[in-house]
Image (spheres, helix red, strand yellow):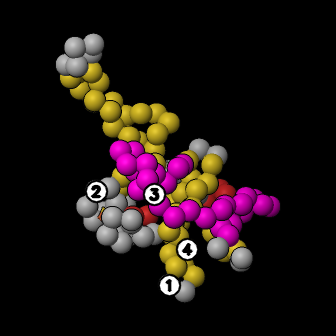
Amino acid sequence: MSELYVAKVEELADHERRIVVEGDLEIGVFRVGDGFFAWENNCPHAGGPVCQGRVMNRVNEVLDDEKRAHGYEFVEDDVHIICPWHGYEFNIRSGAHPGEPNTQLRGFPVEVRGGAVYVRI
Ligand code: FES
């Protein structure tokens, strides 16, 4: 196993990413709060560059007890990456599609050491 330098911690703001490349392997490293998460830039749907998609909080429809809709809200702690090819969404912390938990991004361990972020491959 080897590791790749990603960035200094302060270079990645909350909800930002850095794509690192090693040969044919592309990995998106994301920051959410104080956490860092690394996923292969290869969507399990059809191979799209999922890590280059929009990062945004999950959107929920607000329903009352009768299931009547009252608009939409962003879910504060549920941050998604949205694949730019067909719109599949994945939770950045777990790598899982919210509606199909078995549809999962391939993950890599991330280490923060000496003020810098590294990913192990
Ligand atoms: S390739 Fe990602 S949604 Fe289709």
Residue at horizontal 54 percent and vertical 86 percent from the top = 23
Q: What residue type is labelled 4?
A: Val
Q: Which amino acid does label 2 sit on?
A: Gly
Label 2 CB, ligand 1: below 8 Å? yes
Q: Please say if the residues under marks 3 and 4 sit with CB atoms less than 8 Å apart.
A: no
Mark 1 sits near ligand 1, with its Cβ under 8 Å away:
no
| Tag shown at residue 20 | 4
Residue topped by disc 3: 104
Quarter of the figure with residue 103: bottom left
- State the SS at label 4: strand
Tags 4 and 1 in contact by the CB under 8 Å rule? no
Question: Which quarter of the picture shows residue 72?
Answer: top left
The span picked out in magenta is: 93-120
Q: Quadrant of ligand 1?
A: bottom left
Q: Residue furthest top?
A: 65
Q: Position of residue 9 (x, y in %)?
A: 67, 58
Which comes sooner in the sequence, label 1 or label 3? 1
Question: Which residue lies under the disc numbered 1?
Answer: 24
Q: Check if residue 96 falls in the magenta segment.
A: yes
Residue at x-position 41% and y-position 42%? 57
The tag earlier along the polypeptide, 2 or 4, is: 4
